Amino acid sequence: MVGKIVLETGDILSPPKPDESSRKMVTSESQAADDLKAKGDMLKDSSSDLIGNEESVVSEKPDQSSRKMATSESQAADDLKAKGDMLKDSSSDLIGNEESVVSEKPDQSSRKMATSESQAADDLKAKGDMLKDSSSDLIGNEESVVSEKPDQSSRKIATSESQAADDLKAKGDMLKDSSGDLIGNEDSVVSEKNIPQDLIELILQRLPVKSIFRFKLTCKDWRSLSTLPRFIYKHLQVSQRRLFLHIRGSQVWQHDLETATYSRIQDFGEEIVSISHCDGLVLLSTSCYEPSTKTLSRRIAIWSCSHGECAWIPRIGLSFYDFYCLGRDSKKSYKVLRFTHGRHDQGDFEAEAEAELYDLDSHRWKTVEIIDDWITHGNGNFGVVSVETSSYWVAATEGTYFVQSFDFTAECFRAITLPKAVALSGGKTLALSPFEHQKLSILCQIADKTELWITQVGDVVNWERFLVFRGHQLIPHNPAFLIMEKMVKVFCEEVTVDRSFAKIKIRQIGQGGFEDTQIAQYRFDRPTRSCLYTESLVPLP
C-alpha cells in the first residue's frame, strides 16, 4: 500500500458528571481546612499577646530568649495558617474538578489529589506536635526565662497555647483519616454511577462517527472499543447515517441530509472519472496528464472520508473503458474489481472483455472469468452500489435490462432478473440504491410515473413494488437516491438551457407530490457524478 495521508482530526467531549457522595466528601475537606485556618489565626493572636504583653506577665523584663521563643510561636502559627490556605485551595480544586475524579472509573489524578491532602494533614500534625512541645517548654522553663516568678496569667496563656496545639493535632488526624477514606473507597464513590459495558456499547453504536472520534480522545476504554471489528461493523449496521457525495472535477463535495449543508471536503488535484462506495470506503478513479508521454493516464485510489486517509493502488496500463467496483468478502477482506468490454482507447478495437481482482490485504491482482454477452448501463456515469458481500449495477443484453452483480466471496459474476415492467422499460432512468439492511432497491421512471422496487439480497431474489409516484418532473439518468419511510430523496443536477450553469437540487418525492430544494449553483463545464455514502469507522485497509 502506498502513502496514507491524514486529512482531519476530532474534538473532545466531557465525561459524565459525578454523583453527590463525591461532592460531600470533598466539601468536608474544605470545611476542615477552614477550621485549621481559624485555629491558625487564633494561635497567631495568642502568640502576639504573649509577645506584646510580656512585661505585664513577669515582674522584670524577660531576656532575649523569651522573645525568640514567642516569635517562633508566631512563625509556627503563620505556617499553620498558610497550610490551611493551601489545603482549602486544594479542596476547592477537588470540588471544581470533581468530574475528573469520578467518571466511568476514577483515573490516576483523583488518587494523586487525595494523596496530597493526606500529606498536607501529616504536615499539620507535625506542626501541632512541634507547637505542643514548644508550649510545654514555655511552661516548664518559665522560671529560667524571667528574673522573678511570673504570675498565674503567664501559665494560663501557655496552657491555652498547648490546648490549641492539641486541637490542631486532632484536626490533622481527622483530615488524614478523611483523605485516606477518599483514597481507599474511591471505587465505592463511583460504583453507583458505573454503567454496564454492554449498555455503553449500545449507546456508542448509535452515535455519529465524529462524536465517537471525540470520545476516543477522552476515554482510553472507548478508544480501544472503537477499533474492535465487532464494534465497527455493528456501528455500521446500526447507525446508518447517510450522505450524498458529489464529484465535481477534482473535488469531492458533501451534502448532509440532517444539517442540509453542502460543502467541499477534499480536492484530489486530478479529475475524478468514477466513484463507488462500500462500508464507508470510497473507490476513486482519476484522469491525469503524463508530460513524458503527452497522454492521459488513469489511476485508482481508496479513500476513507471519515478517517481522512487516502492510498493509491499501484497499477499501470489502465484503460478509460474500465469499470471499477469496491466490495468485501465474508471475511471482511476488501477487494477492487476491474472489468472492461474492450480497451478501445489503446488501439485494440477487437479486444475482448476482461476482468481482474485486486486484494487490498495481499496487494496482488489476479484474473477472474467474465462472459461478454452484456453491456454496462450508463457508460461513463456508472452507477454501482455495494450491499453486504456483492456489488450491483444495471446492465443490458439484447434490449432487456437486468442487474449484474459480482460476488466478492465466490469471486464470480451473477445476473439478477428484474421485474418485467422494469426490464422492458427502455432504461431512460434506472438507478440502484441500498435499502435498510441487506436489501437492494431500484428506481425506474417511465414518463411521469416512478416506481420503486425492493428485494432481499442473497441466493433467492424476490422483487416487490414498494412505492409508486405520479405527476412529477423527470429524474436525471443514474441519480443517487435514498428511501425514507414513504418518500424518496433524489440528488439531482439540472443544467440550464444555455448550458452555462448547473443547479444542484434535492428532490423529495412522495404521495402528495414532489418538492425541489436547491442547495447549490455553479458554472457548468462537464457532467458530474454522485453516490450515496454511509459514514463508518472502517479503517483504510
Image (cartoon, rainbow, N blue to C red):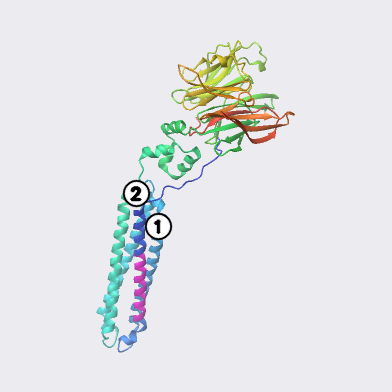
| Residue 382 in sight in this render | no
Residue 43 counted in the magenta span: yes
Q: Give the numbered dot on residue 190.
A: 2
Rendering coords of residue 213 (x, y %): 48, 40
Residue 246 counted in the magenta span: no
Q: Which of the marked residues, 1 or 2, is nearer the chain's N terminus?
A: 1
Q: Which residues make up the magenta segment? A: 32-50
Magenta segment main secondary structure: helix
Q: Give the numbered dot on residue 95.
A: 1
Above or below: residue 85 compared with residue 387: below
The type of residue carrying mark 1 is Ile
Q: Is residue 517 left or right of residue 413?
A: right
Mark 1 Cα shell of 10 Å, populated few (<14), some (14-19), many (≥20): some
Rendering coords of residue 498 (x, y %): 75, 29
Residue 302 image-quadrant placement: top right
Report helix, strand or loop for mark 2.
Answer: helix
Most foreground residue, 158 or 403: 403
Residue 429 image-quadrant placement: top right
